[in-house]
Image (cartoon, rainbow, N blue to C red):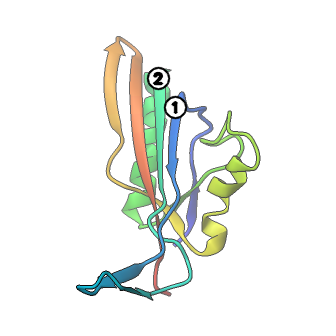
Amino acid sequence: MASVLFPNVSPSSRTFTAGEYPQAVFEAQNGAKSIIRYGNKAVNAKLSLGFTNVSDAIASSILDNYESVNSDWDYVVFGDSRGLQGMEEPLRTDVKDVPSKGAKWRYDGPPKVTSVQPGISNVSCKFVACFDGD
């Protein structure tokens, strides 16, 4: 398993949802709660990137990245100039540091490409941070 760099493309929009800690909540009839936590790391962080009015060549590079990552079950690496442009510190670090906490960014389904006019498309990608057993 290896990392695959995301294309050097600046997104038009971005949504990040921090992960949650795996736990189960048990509630008694009187309202008392017991919580069992199953780990000390947040899981299932989500990242959505939107690319508006990009060339079909850029859309193709994103589709190629998806194929490259999923053909070998690799993971995606983002950087300051690879999907995170326009995001200021410390938020950029929060998104980039997800892998340093043990999770790996993977595609959460295939990218969606919408043709706007000949040669121009909109692309949306969704990613989820996963833990792999070693």
Question: Mark 2 is on which residue type?
Answer: Thr
User: Within the image, what quadrant is residue 73 found in?
Assistant: bottom left
At 56% across and 83% down in the image, what residue appears?
A: 40
- Mark 1 or mark 2: which is in front? 1
Residue 52: percent from the left, percent from the top? 46, 23
Q: Nearer the viewer, residue 38 or 12?
A: 38
The kind of residue tagged 1 is Ser
Callouts 1 and 2 close, C-beta under 8 Å: yes
Work out whether 75 lies above or below 31.
above
Q: In this view, does 101 lie above or below 76?
A: below
Q: How many labels does the image show?
A: 2
Across and down, in percent, residue 31 comes to: 31, 81
> Relative to 57, is 24 on the left or the right?
left
Disc 1 target residue: 13
Mark 1 Cα within 10 Å, few/some/many (few <14, many 20+)? few
Q: In this view, does 45 lie to the left or right of 116?
A: right
Residue 63 lies in what quarter of the image?
A: top left
> Residue 27: image x %, image y %?
29, 83
Write the residue at 39% across / 21% down: 121
Query: In this view, which residue lies farthest toward the left?
Result: 29
Residue on which the image places disc 2: 52
User: From the viewer's perspective, is residue 18 above or below residue 82?
Assistant: below
- Name the residue located 54 percent from the left edge and 27 percent from the top edge: 12
91 lies left or right of 65: right
State the SS at label 2: strand
Residue 10 or 40: which is nearer the viewer? Answer: 40
State whether residue 29 is above or below residue 86. Answer: below
Left or right? Give the position of 54 relative to 121.
right
**Which numbered marker is on residue 35?**
none
